[in-house]
């Protein structure tokens, strides 16, 4: 156990305070709309967008004189601030694990989970999740020896939206992201550069559809009617996870859309061959899979479903160094 009480045997909760923005809104502070009293503010048991927490577990035999990768993970909707554990464990070895928490049952990324209403979704260009992620990472860096070249973010469902948002707004500090059944919203913070990414999505997922969704048109792959599509676009503030993938391809400077098999052990995954070696993009659309279902032909693509699944952690740890 470390002198501060953190351990390799369990997760320890850390509370953090995040500054509210003044007249200038940046990614380091919470915009006025999300501060207590603001139109999109949230509160759960005293936790707000300016007072949050995260859980942390150290790697085995942590050495304060050695630099370690950091993995931030976010789970799906369904509860309040974390009490223990990692929201999206990747079966990491030799890494500092950070379990992210949300306030009102979901991360403030997908649709109205951020704004509280469809009409307020434009406020989410100043997402309160980005200051939270930056503050959590800063807190970890201040206390532990961190390998700044190997900081990763992953998530499932709501946590997948968190990873898409962080991979956009925090590409300046994140080396790579992995997402499962998430998506990228339309009203989001400005992106800060390229990001390596591996994304898993179910072709029958109508909760967080692949898309692209088009207003006024049904989406046959997930059996969604016109009414379903229109409501989903509005409620999620998104046209699907495929547009999020395409945004990453563009930011990474990928040329063309040609793909090749990524790993024979995961036949549903393809890698875009026109991407820079430093910023690979892997896309895993699972035939027949809906939400909460990340397997295909008896192969698991989710580290959360079967302990020890190496797909996502292997992708992150094999990324080449970036000068």
Image (cartoon, rainbow, N blue to C red):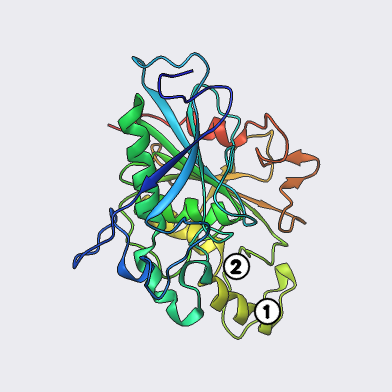
Q: Is residue 152 visible?
A: yes
Q: Is residue 179 visible?
A: no
Gap between marks 2 and 1 measured at Cα: 13 Å
Q: Residue furthest right?
A: 298
Residue at (51, 23) in percent of width and height: 7
Q: Which of the two marks, 2 or 1, is nearer to us in this view?
A: 1
The percent coordinates of residue 258 (x first, y second) are 52, 51
Q: Vertically, is 281 above or below 41? A: above
What label does residue 211 carry, if any? 2
Give the class, few, some or many, for how many residues have Cα within 10 Å of label 2's Cα (few <14, many ≥20).
many
What label does residue 228 carry, if any? 1
Q: Residue furthest front?
A: 46
Q: Vertically, is 148 above or below 67? A: below
Q: Secondary structure at mark 1?
A: helix
Residue at (38, 66) in percent of width and height: 36
Q: Are marks 2 and 1 in contact (CB under 8 Å)?
A: no
Q: Along the polypeptide, which appears first: circle 2 or circle 1?
A: 2
Give the class, few, some or many, for how many residues have Cα within 10 Å of label 1's Cα (few <14, many ≥20).
some
């Amino acid at each position: 156990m470390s002198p501060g009480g953190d351990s390799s045997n369990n997760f320890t909760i850390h509370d953090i305070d995040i500054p509210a923005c003044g007249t200038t809104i940046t990614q380091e502070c919470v915009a006025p709309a999300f501060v207590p009293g603001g139109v999109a503010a949230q509160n759960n048991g005293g936790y707000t967008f300016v007072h949050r927490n995260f859980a942390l577990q150290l790697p085995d035999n942590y050495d304060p004189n050695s630099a370690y990768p950091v993995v931030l993970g976010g789970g799906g909707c369904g509860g309040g601030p974390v009490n223990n554990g990692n929201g999206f464990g990747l079966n990491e070895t030799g890494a500092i694990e950070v379990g992210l928490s949300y306030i009102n049952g979901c991360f403030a990324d997908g649709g109205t989970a951020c704004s509280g209403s469809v009409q307020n979704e434009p406020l989410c260009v100043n997402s309160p999740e980005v200051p939270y992620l930056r503050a959590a990472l800063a807190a970890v860096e201040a206390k532990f020896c961190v390998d700044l070249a190997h900081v990763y973010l992953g998530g499932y469902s709501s946590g997948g939206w968190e990873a898409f948002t962080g991979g956009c707004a925090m590409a300046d500090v994140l080396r790579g992201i992995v997402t499962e059944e998430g998506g990228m919203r339309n009203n989001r913070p400005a992106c800060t550069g390229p990001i390596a990414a591996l994304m898993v999505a179910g072709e029958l997922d109508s909760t967080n559809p692949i898309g692209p969704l088009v207003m006024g048109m049904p989406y046959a792959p997930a059996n969604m009617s016109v009414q379903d599509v229109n409501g989903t676009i509005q409620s999620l503030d998104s046209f699907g996870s495929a547009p999020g993938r395409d945004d990453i391809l563009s930011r990474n400077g990928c040329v063309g859309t040609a793909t090749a098999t990524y790993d024979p052990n995961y036949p549903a995954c393809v890698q875009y061959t026109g991407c820079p070696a430093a910023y690979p993009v892997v896309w895993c659309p699972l035939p027949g899979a809906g939400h909460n279902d990340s397997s295909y032909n008896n192969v698991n693509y989710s580290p959360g479903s079967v302990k020890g699944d190496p797909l996502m952690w292997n992708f992150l740890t094999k990324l080449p160094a970036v000068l």
